[in-house]
Image (cartoon, rainbow, N blue to C red):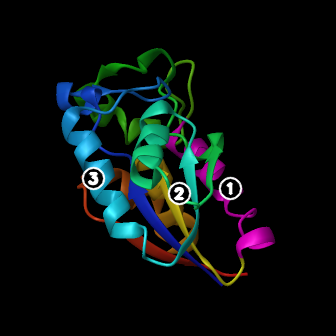
Amino acid sequence: MIEVVFETHSTSEDNEAGIATGWLPGQLSTVGRQQASALGRRRREDGIAAVFASDLQRAVETARIAFDGSSMPILLDWRLRECDYGALNGAPADRIHDERRRRLREPYPGGESWRQATDRIGSFLSDPPNRWAGQRILVIGHVATRWGLDRFLDGRDLDQLVGEEFSWREGWEYVLPD
């Protein structure tokens, strides 16, 4: 068994501007950098063996600020990325949210569907047991990352998740069987 702690990347400039960054890099805002520091204070002594982060800049920046100077390994993985909105990466967040249900199985133009995005997260889950069995890991990602964890580790239905509003909090905890 692996204990998986999930934290979203800290607030980005795009979040504050109401933009859905998708697969664009994004950059943390001043508030986001403060949140990342707080994440480090919360999790450095939490028994975390390794940090896995999306390779998108806003998640990388969150991990690096949070664990700067720590000996904890930070491992970047593209599979932990947000949903690829394709031609709509960088579009107003309201537009992306309005299309969520439609894009559950139908990809965004030039991008992927929410099912494809969460399947990608599911493929990530086969790797940690090879090295981190019996330990506690931290995953830093996006809405799609959390939905993938909810879907594959908690058995939640993606149709239900897509209809829920996302609200930030200090971490979600899951168990990944060996």
User: Which residue is labeled 1 in the image?
Assistant: 124
Which one is in front, 84 or 21? 21
| Percent x, y of residue 12 | 29, 33
User: Which residue is labeled 2 in the image?
Assistant: 148
State which tag comes first along the sequence, 2 or 3: 2
Which residue is drawn at the image coordinates 33% and 59% (left, top)?
Answer: 39
The magenta segment is: 113-132
User: Which residue is labeled 3 in the image?
Assistant: 166
In the image, residue 136 sits, relative to residue 151, either above or below, namely below
State which tag comes first along the sequence, 2 or 1: 1
Residue kind at label 1, given as amino acid type: Phe
> In the drawing, what numbered circle is on residue 66?
none
Pick the quarter of the image with the N terminus.
Answer: bottom right
| Label 1 secondary element | helix
| Percent x, y of residue 3 | 55, 78
Hey, which quadrant is residue 46 in on the image?
Answer: bottom left
Residue kind at label 3, given as amino acid type: Phe
